[in-house]
Image (cartoon, rainbow, N blue to C red):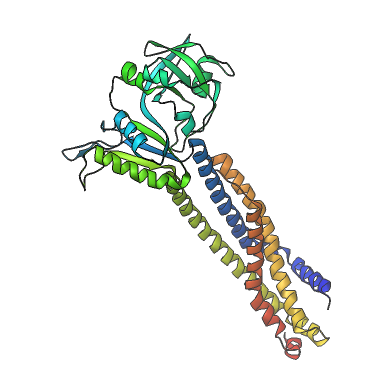
């Protein structure tokens, strides 16, 4: 019997009971849709993490003021005032893996420009920040080392601040803004960078020399953070460890004492998000696996029922010369067809669910061609696996006994 005839008989048999065929495919549709959704969520989350890492900067290490502990009462991150400008200078000169470094002093203030005002983050920093964050200016430029040493009243605006105070596509370089009733000259506007890895809007900020914040806005002598770029990606972990050791030594911390600072790398932030993503993917993968197993069992049950219903037909075919391999192939084709058609509908449903999650819940998703190929492969493998036993049973029937079957 030709292969074409076997396929024709198989599809004709499936078409006789359209409702039963559709219900049999339902488990496969749900399973494949779950597979597509799992892969889309996983790849979307991974792409989101990589995008945020690229946006944050290259080989980034951050040092933040840490806990403050007095009498057993822990004040939390940022409460310590032991992080100083001298610490940042020591890191720059004593740690070989450091390429760029910028101490930071942060505050918030109401900013006024003409008849407009806006409350935003005032980020005191150093001239290396654009190099660390790979962040070009849209208008003008960043402030200079002379501005830092003289605590000059100059400001570089983020995109959100610029649009709020001056309007869209307006170059405010040379304009005067007031921060806590003190005039600052705008020397530049940064390009838009979007949300940071920790969730804050990087464009809703004004950048000024850290010395200006210390001396003319906040009056504090310590710094809140140090932003560092390692010389290469494979040196990030080692450089972070060396920084931690240096700061413990400078802060006279004994073995067993809690750090009064926090050293973080983007790899750590990414690993936290990756672990959360893995948990979600494992949960959805288990749902997909159960759905595929249920769908496969449904296919096997229906094929066994089909073998029983068509026993006389099988016996007649065997009696007039059909080989057992022909019957085996016919039932395997039916099982695989159920799986592949269900898989095709499942892929469409998976695309729909993925787009729905992106639009409604704003979860990043990405369906790659590899995911579609994997889904088709899984559907075909499920059909072969669960269809083999009924097909083998059909091909092993005795023609005489099958013809006598009532």
**Front residue of 197 and 105:** 105
Q: Is residue 216 left or right of residue 113?
A: left
Residue at image position (25%, 32%) is: 82
Quadrant of the image occupied by residue 154:
top left
Can residue 280 be seen by looking at this rendering? yes
What is the residue that sits farthest to the left in this orientation? 71
Rendered view: 20 above or below 284 = below
Q: Position of residue 49 (x, y in %)?
A: 50, 43
In the image, is residue 87 above or below residue 303? above
Q: Pinpoint residue 17: horizontal percent, then vertical percent.
A: 73, 67
Instruction: Choose between 205 and 245: the one closer to the eye.
Output: 245
- Quadrant location, the C terminus: bottom right
The residue positioned farthest toward the top in the image shown:
114
User: Which residue appears at 49% of the width and 16% of the height?
Assistant: 187
Q: Residue at x 47, y 43 (%)?
A: 232
Q: Is residue 166 above or below residue 324?
A: above
Relative to the observer, which residue lies in front, 89 or 263?
89
Q: Locate residue 28 relative to residue 64 in the image: left or right.
A: right
Residue 20 seen: no
Q: Position of residue 215 (x, y in %)?
A: 31, 18
**Count of numbered badges drawn on the protein:** 0
Look at the picture and state if 41 lies above or below 93.
below
Q: In the rendered image, which quarter contains the N terminus?
A: bottom right
The residue positioned 63% from the left and 59% from the top of the image is: 374
Residue 127 position within the rendered picture, expressed as x and y whole percent measured from the top left? 44, 26
Q: Residue lying furthest bottom in this view?
A: 400
């Amino acid at each position: 019997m030709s292969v074409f005839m076997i396929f024709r008989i198989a599809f004709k048999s499936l078409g006789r009971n359209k409702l039963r065929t559709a219900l049999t495919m339902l488990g496969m549709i749900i399973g494949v849709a779950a597979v597509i959704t799992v892969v889309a969520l996983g790849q979307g989350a991974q792409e989101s993490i990589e995008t945020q890492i690229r946006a944050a900067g290259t080989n980034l290490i951050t040092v933040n003021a840490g806990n403050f502990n007095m009498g057993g009462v822990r004040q939390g991150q940022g409460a310590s005032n032991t992080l100083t400008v001298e610490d940042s200078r020591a890191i720059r000169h004593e740690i070989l893996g450091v390429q760029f470094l910028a101490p930071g002093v942060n505050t918030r203030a109401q900013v006024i420009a003409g008849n407009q005002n806006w409350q935003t983050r005032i980020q005191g920093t150093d001239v290396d920040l654009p190099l660390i964050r790979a962040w070009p200016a849209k208008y003008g430029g960043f402030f200079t080392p002379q501005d830092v040493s003289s605590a000059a009243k100059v400001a570089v605006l983020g995109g959100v601040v610029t649009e709020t105070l001056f309007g869209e596509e307006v170059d405010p370089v040379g304009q005067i803004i007031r921060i806590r009733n003190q005039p600052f000259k705008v020397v530049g506007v940064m390009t838009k960078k979007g949300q940071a890895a920790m969730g804050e809007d990087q464009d809703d900020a004004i950048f000024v020399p850290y010395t200006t914040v210390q001396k003319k806005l906040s009056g504090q002598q310590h710094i809140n953070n140090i932003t560092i770029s390692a010389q290469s990606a494979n040196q990030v972990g080692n450089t972070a460890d060396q920084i931690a050791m240096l700061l413990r030594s400078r802060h006279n911390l004994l073995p067993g004492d809690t750090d009064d600072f926090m050293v973080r790398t983007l790899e750590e932030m990414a690993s936290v998000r990756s672990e959360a993503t893995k948990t979600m993917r494992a949960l959805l993968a288990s749902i997909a696996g159960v759905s595929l197993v249920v769908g496969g069992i449904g296919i096997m049950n229906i094929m066994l029922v089909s073998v029983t219903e068509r026993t006389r037909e099988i016996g007649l075919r065997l009696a007039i010369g059909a080989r057992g391999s022909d019957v085996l192939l016919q039932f395997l084709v039916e099982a695989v067809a159920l799986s592949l058609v269900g898989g095709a509908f499942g892929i469409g449903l998976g695309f729909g669910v993925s787009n729905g999650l992106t639009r409604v819940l704003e979860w990043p998703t990405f369906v790659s061609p590899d995911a579609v190929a994997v889904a088709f492969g899984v559907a075909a493998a499920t059909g072969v696996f669960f269809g083999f036993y009924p097909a083998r049973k059909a091909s092993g029937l005795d023609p005489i006994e099958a013809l006598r079957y009532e």
